[in-house]
Amino acid sequence: MAQRKAKKAKRPEKRSPRTPKATSEAKPKPEARAKPQAKAKPVAKPKSEVRIKSLEKERDRLKAQLEVAGARIMSLEQGRDEAVNRIDWVIDSLHNVIESEA
């Protein structure tokens, strides 16, 4: 008589399910459910969003500077116009003096 092997090969304890039905019926291990979830970390803003914010700030700053420069230009033009009018007035007065003497 032939002798049998003393030990048979054992099946693995957990096999992967072969059918979709078996997969849907499989329940997660109790240890997996009991694990505490990691705290959500604050989400960092993407670089593009940070860049957009900085560009918007720069745009607003430049708009304010433009308004100040526009007001300054108007003030300088008004002063120049007043100076030109005074010079014209002096020239006209001198012409009148010369004509009255002649």
Image (cartoon, helix red, strand yellow):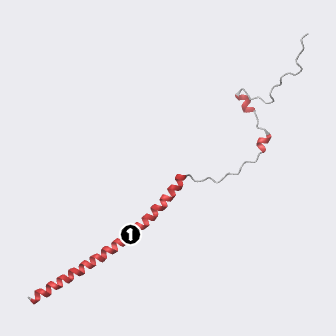
Q: Residue at x 77, y 28 (%)?
A: 15
Q: Position of residue 44 (x, y in %)?
A: 60, 53
Which residue position is annotated with label 1? 69
Numbered marks: total: 1
Above/below status of 28 relative to 85 = above
Q: Residue at x 22, y 80 (%)?
A: 87
Query: As drawn, which residue projects farthest toward the bottom?
Result: 101
Above/below status of 100 relative to 10 = below
Q: Report the amino acid beneath label 1.
A: Ala
Image quarter where the N terminus lies is top right
Please state which of residues 33 and 11 is positioned toward the viewer in this rendering. Answer: 11
> Is 6 placed left or right of 62 in the picture?
right
Query: As drawn, which residue projects farthest toward the top?
Result: 1
Q: Position of residue 92 (x, y in %)?
A: 17, 82
Image quarter where the C terminus lies is bottom left
> Is 78 placed left or right of 52 in the picture?
left
Classed neighbour count for the residue bearing mark 1: other residues with Cα under 10 Å, few (<14), some (14–19), many (≥20): few
Please state which of residues 91 and 5 is positioned toward the viewer in this rendering. Answer: 5
Q: Residue at x 40, y 66 (%)?
A: 66
User: Of helix, strand and loop, which one carries label 1?
Assistant: helix
Query: As drawn, which residue projects farthest toward the left?
Result: 102
Q: Position of residue 100 (x, y in %)?
A: 11, 88
Q: Residue at x 72, y 32 (%)?
A: 24
Above/below status of 40 relative to 87 = above
* Residue 83: quarter of image: bottom left
> Is 101 placed left or right of 6 in the picture?
left
